[in-house]
Image (cartoon, rainbow, N blue to C red):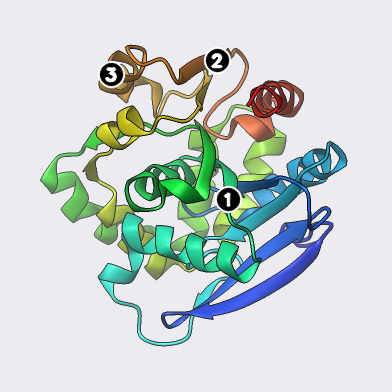
């Protein structure tokens, strides 16, 4: 069975040379919640979460980011189509298509970056923001960014998927899920996105975002946690930021610790 399957209606919208896909789960008039996956994953990451939150009174939108899952190019892919800003505009096209004015935005890793990017020009479309596995700023050496496409191309999608799964979790069930999702992405697009997100600083977007922010920190997330110093220093000085630790969770906290992830996120959403 494909990891892409989930309860709900799959919808498509064509925008700017892209065929974008999303799942729409729950009642149309319910408060909208958007769950956005990380790099090389797809919306299947949130399949079970979508059902849970729809049963708790939310309309849940789960996009496949461009080049992931069912979202594919309809013309030649340019590097500019893979920037944080471009991916954010794709999300706006999706919620416009769904006829949703405002969403509670939840993102993992790259998905969190997309939400942070939206805060600048589309703040009015977000009721709140939550993320996990996302650092708000990152400085990667230029040599590493230059080498990344070559390494990905050399290894190939199967090996990239296997190594990626090993890096996100210690739990075999999570690794299997991640490996399957990674195998379904368009590697060339993922490479272009990865190059775009090597260096960024979106902390000011979050500081200036005067709506509730939840940071779910998986304490076993060894890839992101070492980079969080500037993010936490800036955000813990604000009044709209909340940090919650998930002890047994890695980079994909919703897969590692689903019950704790859902209960903390639901508590945050219900308090708004």
Q: Quadrant of the N terminus?
A: bottom right
Q: Is residue 6 above or below residue 33?
A: below
For disc 3, the marked residue is 234
Marks 3/1: CA distance? 26 Å
Viewer-closest of 57 and 85:
57
Q: Residue furthest bottom?
A: 75
Marks 2/3: CA distance? 16 Å
Residues under numbered marks 3 and 1 in contact, where contact means CB atoms less than 8 Å apart: no
Q: Is residue 247 above or below residue 39?
A: above
Give coordinates of residue 120: x percent, y percent.
Answer: 32, 47
Q: Secondary structure at mark 2?
A: strand
Total marks shown come to: 3
Residues under numbered marks 2 and 1 in contact, where contact means CB atoms less than 8 Å apart: no
Number of the front mark, 2 or 1: 1
Specify whether residue 70 is in view. Answer: no
For disc 2, the marked residue is 244
Q: Quadrant of residue 261?
A: top right
Q: Secondary structure at mark 1?
A: loop
Looking at marks 3 and 1 on the same chain, the residue that comes earlier in the sequence is marked by 1
Q: Secondary structure at mark 3?
A: helix
Marks 2/1: CA distance? 24 Å
Local packing at callout 2 (Cα closer than 10 Å; few below 14, some 14-19, many 20+) is some
Looking at marks 2 and 1 on the same chain, the residue that comes earlier in the sequence is marked by 1
Looking at marks 2 and 3 on the same chain, the residue that comes earlier in the sequence is marked by 3
The residue lying at 38 percent from left, 33 percent from top is: 209
For disc 1, the marked residue is 102
The residue lying at 27 percent from left, 69 percent from top is: 80
The residue lying at 65 percent from left, 55 percent from top is: 62
Specify whether residue 23 is in view. Answer: yes
Give coordinates of residue 244: x percent, y percent.
Answer: 55, 15
């Amino acid at each position: 069975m494909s990891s892409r399957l989930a309860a709900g209606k799959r919808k498509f919208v064509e925008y700017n040379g892209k065929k974008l896909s999303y799942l729409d789960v729950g009642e149309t008039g319910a408060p909208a919640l958007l769950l956005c996956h990380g790099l090389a994953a797809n919306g299947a990451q949130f399949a079970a979460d979508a059902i849970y939150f729809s049963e708790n009174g939310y309309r849940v939108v789960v996009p496949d980011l461009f080049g992931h899952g069912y979202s594919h190019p309809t013309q030649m892919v340019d590097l500019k189509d893979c920037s944080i800003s471009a991916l954010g505009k794709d999300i706006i096209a999706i919620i416009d298509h769904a006829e949703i004015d405002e969403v509670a935005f939840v993102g993992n890793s790259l998905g969190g970056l997309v939400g942070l990017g939206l805060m600048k020009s589309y703040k009015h479309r977000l009721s709140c923001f939550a993320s996990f596995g996302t650092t708000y700023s990152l400085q990667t050496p230029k040599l590493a960014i230059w080498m990344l496409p070559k390494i990905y191309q050399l290894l190939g999608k199967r090996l990239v998927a296997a190594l990626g799964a090993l890096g996100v979790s210690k739990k075999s069930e999570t690794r299997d899920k991640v490996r399957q999702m990674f195998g379904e992405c368009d590697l060339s697009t993922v490479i272009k996105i990865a190059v775009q997100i090597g260096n960024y600083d979106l902390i000011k977007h979050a500081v200036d975002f005067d709506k509730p922010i939840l940071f779910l920190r998986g304490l076993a997330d060894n890839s992101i946690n070492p980079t969080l110093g500037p993010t936490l220093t800036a955000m813990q000085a604000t009044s709209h930021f909340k940090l919650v630790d998930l002890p047994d969770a890695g980079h994909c906290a919703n897969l590692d610790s689903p019950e704790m992830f859902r209960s903390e996120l639901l508590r945050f959403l219900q308090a708004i």
